[in-house]
Each structure stands twice: as structure tokens, then as C-alpha cells.
Amino acid sequence: MNQPAFAHTHTESSMQDCIATCNRCHQICLQTAMNHCLEAGGKHVQADHFRLMINCAEICQLSANFQLSNSAFHRQVCALCAEICEACVADCEAIGGMDECVEACEKCAESCREMASMLH
């Protein structure tokens, strides 16, 4: 452990922030899909959109879990999470009326991109 304590603390703090952001995105995507989308119908329940919402919720939860367990693969999962969150942002913006989901996914994508690019 030749790493300075500050660097470890910064990484730990960044990871905790990313875990919280992933957990929030998981919650918002799942809640939005199961309530707003199902009730709104139409474009909101088209298979590709609904599937993406659920996939996004699941990858966010998985990303948080991989970080919590300090998995050697958490950076790869974070990179995939960012990619799926970005796709969810684009889809939710295209449909409209899903601002809370868009915001949560944007923050999660940004946080996961940062986590994926951190040095070991």
C-alpha cells in the first residue's frame, strides 16, 4: 500500500457517490417504468422502451452491487452502466415527460463513466 491516504480516500468517496447515484437511478427507473409508463401507455409501454427502462434499472443495481463488493470487475460494469444509462436518456427524452428519469440517468452515466476511468 504505497498509495497516499488521500488518494484512497478520494477513490473511496467517489465510489460511495457512484453507489448512491446508481441506487437512485435504479429506484427512479424501476418506479417510473412500473408506474408512470404503465399508466401512460402508448409509447411508454412499447417493448423496446419498457425493456430499456428495466435493463437500466437492473444494470444500475448491479453496478452498485459490484462496487459494494469491491469486485475486480466493477469498472467494466460501470462502463456498461454508463452506456445503458445514456441510451435510456436518449429514449426517455424522445418520448418526453420523463424528466426525473432523464436526470437520474444522466447523473448515473456521468458518475459511472468517471468510476470506469479511474486508475486502479
Image (tube, rainbow, N blue to C red):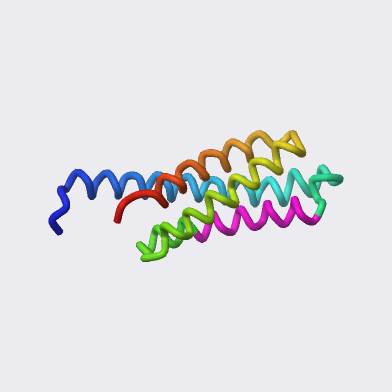
Q: In this view, does 60 lie to the left or right of 41?
A: left
Q: In this view, does 21 lie to the left or right of 3?
A: right
State the image coordinates of residue 47 (x, y, percent, origin top left): 79, 56
State the image coordinates of residue 90 (x, y, percent, origin top left): 67, 41
Q: Does the magenta stretch include residue 54?
A: yes
Which quarter of the figure is the N terminus placed in?
bottom left
Hey, which residue is sitting farthest left in the picture?
Answer: 2
Which quarter of the figure is the C terminus placed in?
bottom left
Q: Which residue is drawn at 50% across and 50% down?
A: 23
**What secondary structure is the magenta-colored segment mainly?**
helix
State the image coordinates of residue 27 (x, y, percent, origin top left): 58, 49
Q: Which residue is drawn at 76% across and 54% down?
A: 48
Rendering quarter of residue 32: top right
Above or below residue 78? Residue 108 is above
Q: Give the range drawn in magenta.
A: 47-62
Above or below residue 40? Residue 119 is below
Hey, which residue is sitting farthest right in the picture?
Answer: 42
Label count reads: 0
Rendering quarter of residue 101: top right
Q: Is residue 31 magenta?
A: no
State the image coordinates of residue 99 (x, y, percent, origin top left): 66, 34
Q: In this view, does 48 lie to the left or right of 79?
A: right
Q: Residue at x 30, y 49 (%)?
A: 12
